[in-house]
Amino acid sequence: MDNIGDLLHGFQVALTGYHLMLMVVGVLFGILVGVLPGLGAPNGVTLLIPLTFTMEPVSAIILLASMYWGALFGGSTTSILFNIPGEPSSVATTFDGHPMAKQGRATEALSYAFLSAAFGALFGVVVITLLAGPAATFAHKFSSPEYFAVYFLAFACFVGLGGASPFKTLVSAGMGFSLAAVGMDTISGSLRLTFELPDLIKGVSFLVAVIGLFGIGELIATMEERLEFRGVHARISPRDVLKTIAALPSYWVVLVRSSLVGCWMGITPGGPTAASFMSYGLARRFAPRTGEFGKGVPEGVIAPEAADLALGIPGSATAAVMMGGLMIWGLHPGPMLFVDQKSFVWGLIASMYVANVVAVVLVLFTVPLFAAILRIPFAIIAPLIVVVCFVSAWTVSSSPFDLWLAFLFGLIGYLFKKCEYPIAPLVLAMVIGDKAEDAFRQSMIIHGGSLGAFWSNWLCGTIMTLGFVLLLWPLVSSALQRTKSPPASAGG
Amino acid sequence: MNKLAPLAFAMALLPASAALAEWKPSKAVEFVVTAGAGGGTDIFARAVQAAVQKNNLMSQPIIVTIKGGGSGAEGYVYTKSAEGDPHKLVFGTHNMYVLPLAAKVAFTHRDLTPIAAMVFDEFMIWVKGDSPIKDAKGFVEAVKAKGGQWKMAGAQSKDSDELVTKLLDKAIGAKIIYVPYKSGGEADVQLSGGHLDSHVNNPAESVGNWKAGKVRPLCVFNREPLAAGPKVTETQAWSDIPTCRSQGIAIDQFQQPRIASLPGKVPAEAVAFYQDLLRKVAETPEWKEYVARTAQSGRVLIGGDLTKFIDGDYVRFQAVFKEEGWLVQ
Amino acid sequence: MEQHDPSASRALATRRTLEVIAAALALAFGATIILGALEYRIGWGERGPEPGYFPFWMGMIVVVGAIGALFEALFARRHADAPMAINADQARRVALFLLPMLGFLVLALIFKLGLYVAMVAYMLTVMLWQGRYRLPAALAVSFGTAAVFYFMFELWLHVPLMKGPVEAWLGIH
């Protein structure tokens, strides 16, 4: 285990005053871009890269990595307070986080979110420290059929939940997959479902859809019921934060399972967004109080948050930009970094430990600040959120069309809510749709069009079978219950 | 200047304005990247940005925006719609004239004003590090021995990687199965994991795994080997990779230009400014370092040379696309 | 605004009507996807699914789901005891919220005035008309918002937002 020795050396690199300062700056900047829905971690990295041209590579990566942590923490804030996910990976946090905030438990929800995210992140960093080598080897076993199996498993964990009509779930998931298919098809190189509209060439942005469905849709629904944010009378006290810290250990099962899901989806190519959905789905399926999920239970916040940060390898888009950064700083990304640039790699890993602690402390300090936003009169805050939504939709790709799209998705979100169509299958389908399709068709090209590809080895076969079991589980368990006991009254 | 702003705004809509003899950007210049973040085009744009900023070649700041949707069509359509605006420079490859051949993308390369091709990226045949194949001859034999089951990975569909594969098919008289991925990086991960037989990545896309011994280049599609440079692995430098032609694969040269263009109908003074700027960039040590590090060929084409090159390359792609039945119209 | 008991307000649409509308829209969406998919081959070739295959079947899934939801809405008992989905009061509030929003988009995108002008106009409208704020307060908040966005996006983050002739006239690029 000379990893530990390398890590100690890494701490010497990370714990200098200059690097600590960079972490604080990075985290604060990250919180800002994370809070704004259109600007995510990838934008943050893009904006910071010019500043790093003159830095040492290890200082540069510390700044960027800290920014990434900050962005993920910040993303949860708007999810909980306004139902607007600041980052794609915090969509699942809205399901229970926002209901909690509406019940006046904003501080509690935010604290749970940050603390479990930090737990997941630290868990992930420990895994990297101990298992960087084996994890990379394991990741190499993944080819297109396994990729597809991973997406399938993530989807299977999530659908079939809740009391929604199965027809409505079909509509929602089908819409999500269809929207994901709009634009360039990687496998054939043709533009699909664009109907000759130049604006659709780039596809339908997941972020724009989320801004509309969640942010604007939620506002319309709030307006209809003439509710104000019920968080208005929430007392913001540091004591709430402390109480939450004390309560956290009792959720250790959810925490550990979610962190494992996060690591699994980080090693396999599932990514943080799919990880948070999968983790939420599992938490809900195996929770004693399944029926209360979606109405504001702490587990519903802890599960997605602990999963979306675990492993600490930034999601693909951000990682890609950072890789580009590595090239500019004169380093070649790849397995040889661990040998060629030891102090760089271990300095980065050590800085993940430190930056996490820095991020949690900073972000907990901002909780009362953010929660205070809820005290602003509704007649000001509502139009302000609308402005933030539209500006965010613009920043996604500077396209006027996206603003109309966000508005349209707002109406759809409202209609979905009124008629009890589930939104989550649509969102998850949009996230994994095109990747799953690519992986499926690559598998078919490699294996000559035979579906046996997905059971051609133990790894892939196991994941697929597990997916089918989870997919059919609700049917099986409800059938079992029906035979065992007389129909129980719903609710609780 | 501020008082003249409305006037300047109106004049920007005119094709060429005589009033601005010595043209200079009056606001931040946007670098539009027509590929994903971290890809070859992104690094190209950022290398230009770094060279400009470090050497103070321009007073206005540079903003890099990623518009890689639709295989880059997003960025080109965006630039096309900014007709007459000389504050947008779009960075791309030959996808600017290849994309419209195979897909209905609402732009052609004639909607843009090419400024300079600054560097040419190479293509190589790569196999897994521990593959028994030693050279291009062995590669051809192995492909033929697999009898139509050889799997070649590449980035995107109906783009350069698939085109090289088609040319290779013809040159060696075999049928290779082409498996498209989103990027060369993904293809490289799959090859190094042993899930495919080969790929045709650019040097920079695979250098990390080459150093680690996970993948290995066999030959380069060029007339001559690459310029001499430092050793990349313990035993080899880029210049030690032989040309495919010398190994009996009859493909003369296949390279990917990296081109920067302005929107259409921009003032001639602005064109001259950027031509001069990019010429200066190509002289900076930062740029030379970038070209060497990514093992590309630093050859700058400007003005008439560039037009001639684009027209020639366009015809060549069109011919293959026609034969394969890929043309969209 | 007077206090109304929501149940006293006239029903505008029953739950059933709303369900039928939603299902019909979903049906139209699914049909559009199928039409778009038919531009390409939708079969299963020798190397797996062709480009139109996935969009086609996803469109079919939406259509099947929509027809199912339509039947549920028309014939299932489920919504019989929830006749009212939206009453006149609620509809009015939603419309009052959506109209200025639509105005924002029309001003920014159709009249091409850009986001800054539109956001000032929008905030002013909502605060004066619906929030019943006094003019000075409304002016301060709306221009303040625009200023904050300008400093944050243009100067600090270097992310240009959409601008129109007003900014050009002021000399702000």
Image (cartoon, rainbow, N blue to C red):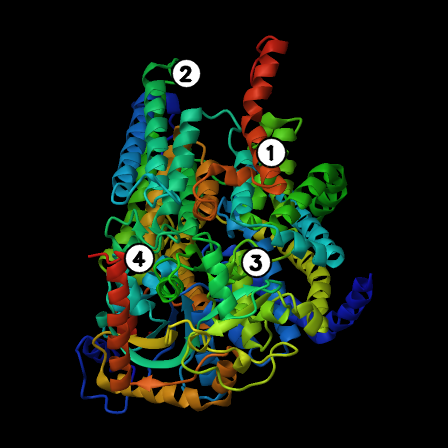
Q: Answer yes or no: do the residues labelled 2 and 1 have beta carbons within 8 Å?
A: no
Question: Would you name the residue on which mark 1 appears?
Answer: A466
Q: Amino acid at mark 4?
A: Pro
Quadrant of the drawing holding the C terminus of chain A: top right
What's the CA distance linking mark 2 and mark 4? Answer: 41 Å
Label 1 or label 3, whichever lies nearer to me, is 1
Q: Position of residue A43 (x, y in %)?
A: 49, 63
Q: Are marks 2 and 1 on the same chain?
A: no
Q: Are marks 1 and 3 on the same chain?
A: yes
Chain where mark 4 sits: A
Q: Answer yes or no: do the residues labelled 2 and 4 have beta carbons within 8 Å?
A: no
Question: Would you name the residue on which mark 2 appears?
Answer: C78
What's the CA distance linking mark 3 and mark 2? Answer: 44 Å
Q: Amino acid at mark 3?
A: Ala
Judge from the rendering whether residue A354 lies leftward or rightward of residue B23; answer left or right: right
- Disc 1: CA contacts within 10 A as few (<14), some (14-19) or many (>=20): some
What's the CA distance linking mark 3 and mark 4? Answer: 25 Å
Residue drawn at the location 37% of the way across and 57% of the way down: B157
Q: Amino acid at mark 2?
A: Arg
- Disc 4: CA contacts within 10 A as few (<14), some (14-19) or many (>=20): many
